[in-house]
Image (cartoon, rainbow, N blue to C red):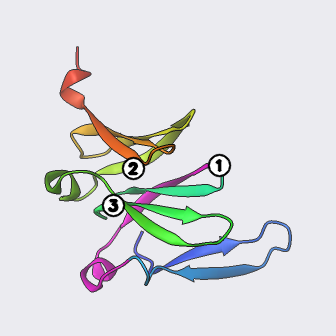
Amino acid sequence: HDAEQILVINSKTEQIRTISLDAVLDTPAKKSRRKWNGIIRCGTQLYCAPYTASSILMIDGETERLRTISVGSEEEEKGERKWAGIANYDSKLFFCPANASSVMVFNTKNESVYHIPLSSLIL
């Protein structure tokens, strides 16, 4: 949650190392706590759910290049404990809301983001 690095464990060699988040974190974000919560693999990419971060963290599993993907509007980027946990179905990632008012859906094929409001799910 609070780290400024990603822990990498090579399961074959059992070597441990880190990848710095400096490339994707500005100074205020470095000081924030619980930036991302939950990680999932889809193809060669890894995706982390924005908990207090304002974007999805994407990690290229082959090159280890990091980048962020906007979650949509400014309103959706604000707040804490937004999404925690991710499910993968076909080429779509579904981000489970913690305090967010929607399920966030990320299409990995065209990198589009849309939201399913929780109010539309309540019977």
Q: Which residue extends farthest top?
A: 123
Q: Is residue 32 left or right of residue 42?
A: left
- Rendered-image quadrant of the C terminus: top left
Q: Which residue extends farthest front?
A: 110
Q: Residue at x 45, y 68 (%)?
A: 67
Q: CA distance from mark 3 to mark 2?
A: 13 Å
Q: Of callouts 1 and 2, which one flags the residue occurring earlier in the amino acid sequence? A: 1
Label 3 residue SS: strand
Q: Of callouts 3 and 1, which one flags the residue occurring earlier in the amino acid sequence? A: 1
Q: Which residue extends farthest left?
A: 75
Residue that numbered label 3 is attached to: 55
32 relative to 39, above or below: below
Label 1 residue SS: loop
Task: Using the image as rendered, state which of residue 19 and residue 85 is in the foreground.
Answer: 19
* Amino acid type of the residue that numbered disc 1 sits on in the rendered structure: Gly
Mark toward the viewer: 3 or 2: 3
| Residues drawn in magenta | 25-42
Q: Per the image, is 57 magenta? A: no
Q: Of callouts 3 and 2, which one flags the residue occurring earlier in the amino acid sequence? A: 3
Name the quadrant containing residue 4: bottom left
Label 2 residue SS: strand
Tell me the crowding category of disc 1: few under 14, some 14 to 19, or many 20 or more residues within 10 angstroms, Cα based.
Answer: few
